[in-house]
Amino acid sequence: MSKHWTARTLPPELADTSRWRVVDADALGDEQRVRFSKFQAAIAAYLQTGKSAAISKELGLPRNGIIRQLNRCVTLAADGKPYGWAALIPKLRTGGYERKAQLPSGRQRSGGARAGAFRVFMTLNPEIKQKIDNLILKRAAAGVVHEARIAIKNIHAAFVSYCEEAGITGNQYPLNSKSRGRRSIERYVNDVLLSASEEACRARFGAVAHLHMNVGRGRQSCPMAYAPYDVVGIDPHKLDCIGTVRITGPKGPQRVAIERLWIVPVVDDHSRAILGYSVGIRTECSAATIEQCIISAMSAWQPRNLKIPKMVYAPGAGLPSGRFPELIGRAWAAMMVDNAAVHYSRAITERARRRLGCAVNYGPIGHWEHRPALERVMRTLEAYGFQRLPSTMGSSPVDPAKDDPVRKAVGLGIDWEVLLDLIDVVIANYNATPNEALGNRSPLSLLHDYVEQGSLDFLPRRLPPPIATIAELGVTIETKTIRGDLQQGRRPYIEIDRVRYTSPILGSAFGLVGKKMRVHIRESNMCSVHAYHESGEELGILQAQGAWGRTVHTREMRKQINALRDSGELVVGYQDNPVVALLNYLGSATHKEAEKKPMNVSRSATKLVRAAHASGLPVVPEISNAAPSAPPPSSQPMLSVVQPEQSKTRALSVLVKPPQWKTVIR
């Protein structure tokens, strides 16, 4: 105890017993309760009157005992607050043991008077203490590269070397004992971990455990959402299971595994309802997938035509826009996203923010706890849906549920379209499932009350119609020049990604040739675009010319087709459909990958499924092994071509390169 206080010398902030820790006296035994009550009354009266003799006589307590207990009560605990009335509990220690004797010297056997010696040694050798703390907490130090997680025995070995470097001999503490301070180091490491818990958690148990330290602090944060549609959370998650695609090859149908799907939900923070979602069939989630989930949240939901008979929607299940028509086209006030690169795209920072008129909150880096509703919903979907499939990837690399997922997906034929059905059913059923955080009510039930009552707290905003300068979600605005030539009979048109667009109105407006036009391009369907004059006046819909205008395709698919044509890998005739040609090309590439590694995830198969899903075309590429027709006879008389026998099967697709026929010199 650093100072002996009395009622006169005690500072006012310590003498205020109303700020002391309280004690549940009923938890004490009868004798302990009587003792506690006497000392509590004695200390309270002593602080009020400053006279201890009369109090000591009245309560039968020694005067020095009252003063000693008072000093125990005002002793500061580890949290910086006085122990208060808790110091009156018998056998409660208010301070650590302080060694008064000198450190033991000479060779020591087991046992001996070494209590508190290690703490004194560390106080006398701050450099050694600093080095040991750096090892335990992995603090940066000059010339030191830390282990991933240093073992206790290695910390002890380093401690011994530090002592020897400091000139401590074998006859001095702590090297004069048989264990050379091994047990003391173990206790010291535990004390450091408990005293510097956050830093120690990151150093000893990794970043994931350290992130969990951000929750459960006991402090209530200010709620941002007081009603539905106040705040929503958006975050892409990879589906924890593998799907396949069925292709047709020379030896019949074959299943090929695709990469894991991305699911991007829009979760309302107040009602915990999933307002909408999108699915990304790709290696990494794209900005278009994020934008599509926002569109889904404000569009009317329709149940899917499920392929598995026993897979059904629960009664009353669905998305809010499908259950309550009043919520179609309604937007929210704030949108919570993380700091992933895809969330900094123009689709989110500009188009979505300007169109919705909402605030975008990115939150601090690495702090997922700022979106608790979203993270909790995704964990629920994974545990009760996707991680129950035979092809699950499990919740972690060591999850025993993970049992050769690719082979299970191929063997059981878990089709990618079935996964899309499962995603829709799991999300729709979740919205109709009672939630403990909502008082065992379902998210849809809570939304129903808000919609029906018409509360003023619930004010989802209806978006205005799009204009020339602010386009609809999922639409890119570009400025194009109108081309055409009356002398050559070439009608007016614009060109987007090497494809011409026109309409009956534009095709007759030769006076617009050479002028600029604002074009709204929906990149998910490039068959047509919406055109405006520079003044903002609407011109109308322009249709893609040729085969490009007959099949739905994305801008990404068009650029991919153009790149393959430039490299010579894809040959598309004038009458051929380029989208069908791309599917056949990807089917051929998928078949080649499956022949080499049939039980591996195929990136070409993923691209094939993405193209088929975007275009709505079936994934049935025809891969034939028939020989092509014979080449024309050579003009050189000294050379002749050895030709194979003509096959009666259908000819190869134009996508398959012609073989190099063997030439024989005669």
Image (tube, helix red, strand yellow):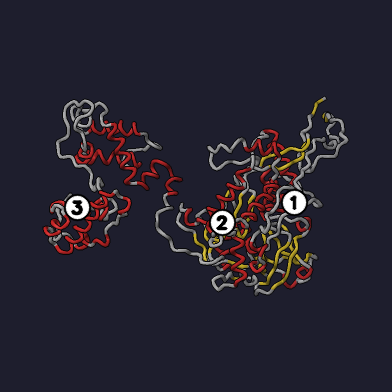
Q: Dot 3 corresponds to which residue? A: 69
Q: Is residue 288 visible?
A: no
The relative height of residue 150 versus residue 260 in the rendered view (above or below) is above
Residue 291, image quadrant: bottom right
Amino acid tagged 2: Asn
> SS at mark 3?
helix
The relative height of residue 206 versus residue 596 in the rendered view (above or below) is below
Q: Dot 1 corresponds to which residue? A: 579
Using a 10 Å C-alpha cutoff, classify the residue at mark 2 as few (fewer than 14 neighbours), some (14 to 19) or many (20 or more). Answer: some
For the C terminus, give its image quadrant: top right
Disc 2 versus disc 1: nearer the observer = 2
Amino acid tagged 1: Val
| Residue 532 vs residue 140, the one in the foreground | 140
> SS at mark 1?
helix
Amino acid tagged 3: Gln
x, y percent for residue 421: 69, 50
Disc 3 versus disc 2: nearer the observer = 3
